[in-house]
Image (spheres, helix red, strand yellow):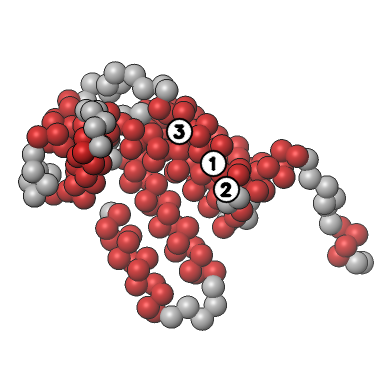
Amino acid sequence: MNEKEHEYPTEQSSFESFLQRLAEGRWWVVLPVLAVFGALYLLTWVENVGDTDDVYYFSYLVENFALNYVGDPRLMLYKAMMQWIYHGLHAIDIAVSGLTVMRGFSAISGAFAVLVFYQLLARDLKLHVYTAATATMLLATSYGFWRYAIEAEVYVPAILLLLITLRWFYRLDQRENVSAMAWLPVGVFSGLVV
Protein backbone atom coordinates (compact mmCIF):
# COMPACT_ATOMS: atom_id res chain seq x y z
CA MET A 1 0.00 0.00 0.00
CA ASN A 2 1.03 3.49 -0.70
CA GLU A 3 1.63 5.81 2.26
CA LYS A 4 -0.29 8.58 0.52
CA GLU A 5 -3.51 6.54 0.74
CA HIS A 6 -3.40 6.75 4.56
CA GLU A 7 -2.71 10.45 4.92
CA TYR A 8 -5.24 12.71 6.52
CA PRO A 9 -6.81 15.46 4.44
CA THR A 10 -4.59 18.49 4.21
CA GLU A 11 -7.34 21.10 4.18
CA GLN A 12 -7.14 23.35 7.20
CA SER A 13 -9.86 25.46 8.73
CA SER A 14 -9.08 29.14 9.11
CA PHE A 15 -8.81 28.65 12.89
CA GLU A 16 -6.36 25.79 12.44
CA SER A 17 -4.38 27.94 10.02
CA PHE A 18 -4.34 30.73 12.62
CA LEU A 19 -3.05 28.32 15.26
CA GLN A 20 -0.38 27.05 12.88
CA ARG A 21 0.81 30.61 12.22
CA LEU A 22 0.86 31.24 15.96
CA ALA A 23 3.05 28.16 16.43
CA GLU A 24 5.38 29.44 13.72
CA GLY A 25 5.70 32.77 15.53
CA ARG A 26 4.26 35.02 12.82
CA TRP A 27 4.29 38.48 14.37
CA TRP A 28 0.87 39.55 13.01
CA VAL A 29 -0.66 36.59 14.86
CA VAL A 30 1.57 36.69 17.94
CA LEU A 31 1.00 40.37 18.79
CA PRO A 32 -2.82 40.17 19.06
CA VAL A 33 -2.57 36.98 21.14
CA LEU A 34 -0.06 38.65 23.49
CA ALA A 35 -2.38 41.67 23.69
CA VAL A 36 -5.39 39.50 24.59
CA PHE A 37 -3.60 37.59 27.34
CA GLY A 38 -1.80 40.71 28.55
CA ALA A 39 -5.17 42.47 28.81
CA LEU A 40 -6.70 39.45 30.56
CA TYR A 41 -4.05 39.56 33.26
CA LEU A 42 -3.66 43.34 33.48
CA LEU A 43 -7.40 44.03 33.65
CA THR A 44 -8.28 41.35 36.19
CA TRP A 45 -6.05 42.53 39.03
CA VAL A 46 -7.60 42.22 42.44
CA GLU A 47 -6.22 43.58 45.66
CA ASN A 48 -3.77 41.08 47.12
CA VAL A 49 -5.77 37.90 46.54
CA GLY A 50 -3.53 35.75 48.72
CA ASP A 51 -3.08 38.12 51.63
CA THR A 52 0.64 37.73 51.18
CA ASP A 53 2.31 40.53 53.06
CA ASP A 54 5.63 39.73 51.43
CA VAL A 55 4.56 41.39 48.15
CA TYR A 56 4.05 44.66 49.99
CA TYR A 57 7.40 44.29 51.72
CA PHE A 58 9.08 43.45 48.44
CA SER A 59 7.56 46.46 46.67
CA TYR A 60 8.77 48.59 49.59
CA LEU A 61 12.29 47.24 48.96
CA VAL A 62 12.01 48.07 45.26
CA GLU A 63 10.94 51.64 45.99
CA ASN A 64 13.17 52.51 48.94
CA PHE A 65 16.37 50.49 49.00
CA ALA A 66 19.57 50.81 46.99
CA LEU A 67 20.34 48.44 44.14
CA ASN A 68 23.22 46.94 46.09
CA TYR A 69 20.95 45.98 49.01
CA VAL A 70 20.50 42.22 48.63
CA GLY A 71 17.70 41.47 51.08
CA ASP A 72 16.76 37.94 50.01
CA PRO A 73 19.65 36.46 47.98
CA ARG A 74 17.28 34.10 46.15
CA LEU A 75 15.49 37.08 44.61
CA MET A 76 18.32 39.53 44.03
CA LEU A 77 18.18 39.43 40.20
CA TYR A 78 14.41 39.87 40.24
CA LYS A 79 14.62 42.73 42.75
CA ALA A 80 17.33 44.48 40.73
CA MET A 81 15.29 44.15 37.53
CA MET A 82 12.17 45.54 39.24
CA GLN A 83 14.21 48.44 40.61
CA TRP A 84 15.63 49.25 37.17
CA ILE A 85 12.12 49.27 35.69
CA TYR A 86 10.71 51.27 38.62
CA HIS A 87 13.45 53.91 38.52
CA GLY A 88 13.42 53.99 34.71
CA LEU A 89 9.70 54.75 34.69
CA HIS A 90 10.19 57.46 37.29
CA ALA A 91 13.05 58.95 35.25
CA ILE A 92 10.62 59.54 32.38
CA ASP A 93 7.97 60.95 34.74
CA ILE A 94 5.73 57.91 34.95
CA ALA A 95 4.94 57.76 38.65
CA VAL A 96 3.85 54.22 39.56
CA SER A 97 4.31 52.23 42.72
CA GLY A 98 6.73 49.35 43.01
CA LEU A 99 3.73 47.05 43.50
CA THR A 100 2.23 48.17 40.19
CA VAL A 101 5.54 47.65 38.39
CA MET A 102 5.85 44.14 39.81
CA ARG A 103 2.24 43.23 39.02
CA GLY A 104 2.56 44.60 35.50
CA PHE A 105 5.75 42.62 34.96
CA SER A 106 4.03 39.46 36.18
CA ALA A 107 1.06 40.04 33.87
CA ILE A 108 3.24 40.64 30.82
CA SER A 109 5.40 37.64 31.75
CA GLY A 110 2.21 35.59 32.00
CA ALA A 111 1.15 36.56 28.48
CA PHE A 112 4.57 35.65 27.08
CA ALA A 113 4.64 32.39 29.09
CA VAL A 114 1.31 31.36 27.55
CA LEU A 115 2.72 31.99 24.07
CA VAL A 116 6.00 30.17 24.73
CA PHE A 117 4.13 27.22 26.25
CA TYR A 118 1.92 26.96 23.16
CA GLN A 119 4.91 27.13 20.82
CA LEU A 120 6.76 24.50 22.87
CA LEU A 121 3.81 22.13 22.53
CA ALA A 122 2.84 22.85 18.91
CA ARG A 123 6.16 23.58 17.27
CA ASP A 124 8.80 21.77 19.29
CA LEU A 125 6.89 18.76 20.63
CA LYS A 126 4.77 18.66 17.46
CA LEU A 127 1.41 18.20 19.14
CA HIS A 128 -1.59 18.95 16.96
CA VAL A 129 -2.42 22.65 17.14
CA TYR A 130 -5.85 21.94 18.67
CA THR A 131 -4.28 19.83 21.42
CA ALA A 132 -1.63 22.48 22.06
CA ALA A 133 -4.24 25.25 22.10
CA THR A 134 -6.46 23.32 24.53
CA ALA A 135 -3.56 22.64 26.91
CA THR A 136 -2.45 26.26 26.65
CA MET A 137 -5.93 27.62 27.38
CA LEU A 138 -6.23 25.32 30.39
CA LEU A 139 -2.95 26.69 31.72
CA ALA A 140 -3.71 30.32 30.87
CA THR A 141 -7.13 30.32 32.54
CA SER A 142 -6.34 28.08 35.49
CA TYR A 143 -6.75 29.75 38.85
CA GLY A 144 -3.18 29.00 39.94
CA PHE A 145 -1.55 30.52 36.86
CA TRP A 146 -3.93 33.50 36.74
CA ARG A 147 -3.48 34.19 40.45
CA TYR A 148 0.30 34.51 40.13
CA ALA A 149 0.10 36.33 36.79
CA ILE A 150 -1.82 39.14 38.50
CA GLU A 151 0.24 39.21 41.69
CA ALA A 152 3.57 40.87 42.43
CA GLU A 153 5.40 37.57 42.76
CA VAL A 154 8.39 35.99 41.06
CA TYR A 155 6.64 32.76 40.06
CA VAL A 156 5.25 33.63 36.61
CA PRO A 157 8.41 35.42 35.42
CA ALA A 158 10.32 32.32 36.59
CA ILE A 159 7.90 30.06 34.69
CA LEU A 160 8.49 32.14 31.56
CA LEU A 161 12.25 31.82 31.89
CA LEU A 162 11.99 28.07 32.51
CA LEU A 163 9.81 27.64 29.41
CA ILE A 164 12.33 29.61 27.35
CA THR A 165 15.07 27.36 28.72
CA LEU A 166 13.10 24.22 27.85
CA ARG A 167 12.57 25.43 24.27
CA TRP A 168 16.25 26.28 23.98
CA PHE A 169 17.33 22.88 25.32
CA TYR A 170 14.88 21.07 23.08
CA ARG A 171 15.92 22.94 19.95
CA LEU A 172 19.62 22.29 20.61
CA ASP A 173 18.90 18.63 21.28
CA GLN A 174 17.08 18.27 17.95
CA ARG A 175 20.05 19.55 15.94
CA GLU A 176 22.78 17.26 14.74
CA ASN A 177 26.47 17.80 15.45
CA VAL A 178 26.01 20.43 18.14
CA SER A 179 29.29 21.44 19.72
CA ALA A 180 29.77 21.56 23.46
CA MET A 181 30.19 25.33 23.24
CA ALA A 182 26.65 25.65 21.86
CA TRP A 183 25.34 24.21 25.14
CA LEU A 184 27.31 26.67 27.28
CA PRO A 185 24.96 29.70 26.93
CA VAL A 186 21.85 27.65 27.61
CA GLY A 187 23.55 26.09 30.64
CA VAL A 188 24.52 29.51 32.02
CA PHE A 189 21.01 30.87 31.31
CA SER A 190 19.33 27.91 33.01
CA GLY A 191 21.62 28.35 36.01
CA LEU A 192 20.56 31.98 36.33
CA VAL A 193 16.90 31.05 35.94
CA VAL A 194 17.00 28.62 38.83
**Quadrant location, the N terminus:** bottom right
Q: Residue at x 37, y 45 (%)?
A: 159
Q: Residue at x 47, y 27 (%)?
A: 40
Q: Is residue 105 left or right of residue 19?
A: left
- The kind of residue on which mark 1 rests is Leu
Q: Is residue 60 left or right of residue 105?
A: left
Q: Residues within 10 Å of mark 3 (few under 14, many from 20)?
A: many
Cα separation between marks 3 and 1: 10 Å
Cα separation between marks 3 and 2: 16 Å
Residue identified by numbered label 2? 27
Position in image of residue 114 (x %, y %): 48, 41
Residue identified by numbered label 3? 38
N-terminal label among 3 and 1: 1
Foreground label between 3 and 2: 2
Q: Are marks 2 and 1 in contact (CB under 8 Å)?
A: yes
129, above or below 4, in the image: above
Q: Residues within 10 Å of mark 2 (few under 14, many from 20)?
A: few
The answer to which quarter of the image holds residue 88 is top left
Label ID, residue 54: none
> Residue 4 or 62: which is nearer the viewer?
62
Q: Is residue 127 left or right of residue 54?
A: right
In the displayed orientation, state which residue is furthest to the top: 47
Q: Residues within 10 Å of mark 1 (few under 14, many from 20)?
A: few
Q: Are marks 3 and 2 in contact (CB under 8 Å)?
A: no
Q: Is residue 86 visible?
A: no
